[in-house]
Amino acid sequence: MPYPMKNFIITCIAIACTFTSLAQIEQDSIPEKKVEFSVMPFLSYNRNLEFMFGAIPMFMYKTTKDDTISPKSISGVSAVYTTNKSYFIAAFNKWYFKEDSWRAKLFAVTGDNNSQFYMDDYDTPGFYDYGTKITVVSAGVQRKIIPHLYGGLTYTYAHYDTVYEDDVQPEDITETNGIEFNVLYDTRDAVYYPTTGINSIVKFVTFPTWFGNDVKAQKITAEYNTYFPMKTGRDVLAARFSGTFGLGDIAFQQQETIGNKDIRGYSEGKYRGDGVLALQGEYRYNFNDKMGLVGFAGLATLYGSDTEDFDWKAYPGIGVGYRYRAFKKVKFNIGIDGAVGKDDWSVNFRIGEAF
């Protein structure tokens, strides 16, 4: 079964944002503009997608100039091509408005992902190639209920057309319509680079048959992130717990893979199943206002794998990373992480922090 599409999307967007134009980043002497604009080119390498080429124009702005409470919003588009003949085009938006009483997001992507998956129930166990044509559109909104507590609703449409190497599995065309209900508790002092506070969210995603899904399924996701200031607030110690639990008939494109931010150190897409649990910590060391280093370690496990020997085993990950401030007036980092895991390794390029 293939590496989940959402991990492909997240990884590619993060890679693109690493190579921000230095001419744009370092103009600190220029007065703050209503809209900050950066074109972010990139050239990188991924174990599955090989060399990547692309660009992301990105904007940071206030939705209302008189709103001094809401964080700045972000909008951008991205285009990526890889030497294994994958590509995607995406648009992403995150808005904050009405003095942070409302938060909204809109994301859309279309592309062709050529990657690999692991099978042990075939004549020759090992990795097999696959290609998936994907289209995903997701829109969501959250409303403040009481201070620091938000309730939200998200709709996501996805269409996948997957073809497997040597016909090890039949061609699979899957279309899903997901409805997500979420509750967010957010006491962070900043949304892009928190130094103190808690960011915790619980999501319930349902794929009911009455909403155009072939089979009924649900997913529950819980995340708890907490931040502690160190060295009088210059550095940060961050900790994270996350768990995703698939219920019912989870399509292979909806399954979870160990990797990316939970847990870094895995990129082959080998360890995947209906649910993943992970615990990790990260120390963020800032040696000046623009640059910093991070060190992190964590442990994950999974269940519902097609390879039963993978279930409920320990999958550790450990690594280091580099950060660079990408915008003048807002602490918003881009960077790169290198990590090792169990019989695997990864290079993760980031837009923003891992969590």
Image (cartoon, rainbow, N blue to C red):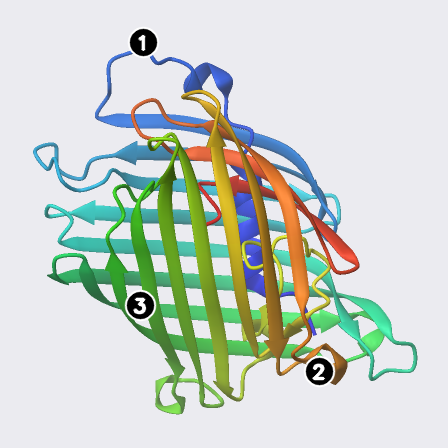
Say whether disc 1 or disc 3 marks the residue closer to the N-terminus: 1
Residue with the mark numbered 2: 306
Give SS at disc 2: loop
Q: Amino acid at mark 2?
A: Asp
Q: Amino acid at mark 3?
A: Thr
Picture layout, residue 225 above or below residue 244:
above
State the residue at coordinates (32%, 56%).
199
The quadrant in which the N terminus is found is bottom right
Give SS at disc 3: strand
Graded by Cα atoms within 10 Å as few (under 14), some (14 to 19) or many (20 or more), the crowding at tag 1 reads: few
Say whether disc 1 or disc 2 marks the residue closer to the N-terminus: 1
Graded by Cα atoms within 10 Å as few (under 14), some (14 to 19) or many (20 or more), the crowding at tag 2 reads: some
Q: Are marks 1 and 2 in contact (CB under 8 Å)?
A: no
**How far apart are the two marked residues, 2 and 3, measured between alpha carbons?**
29 Å
Say whether disc 2 or disc 3 marks the residue closer to the N-terminus: 3
Quarter-wise, where is residue 186 in the image? bottom left
- Which label belongs to residue 179? none
Comparing 119 with 188, the one in front is 188
Closer to the observer: label 2 or label 3? 2
The single residue placed furthest to the top in the displayed view is: 29
Quarter-wise, where is residue 206 in the image? bottom left
Q: Amino acid at mark 1?
A: Ser
Graded by Cα atoms within 10 Å as few (under 14), some (14 to 19) or many (20 or more), the crowding at tag 3 reads: some
Comparing 163 with 32, the one in front is 32
State the residue at coordinates (24%, 21%).
33
Q: Are marks 2 and 3 in contact (CB under 8 Å)?
A: no
**How far apart are the two marked residues, 1 and 2, measured between alpha carbons?**
56 Å
- Which label belongs to residue 29? 1
Picture layout, residue 180 above or below residue 265:
below
- Which label belongs to residue 154? 3
State the residue at coordinates (53%, 43%).
14
As drawn, is 174 to the left or to the right of 26? right
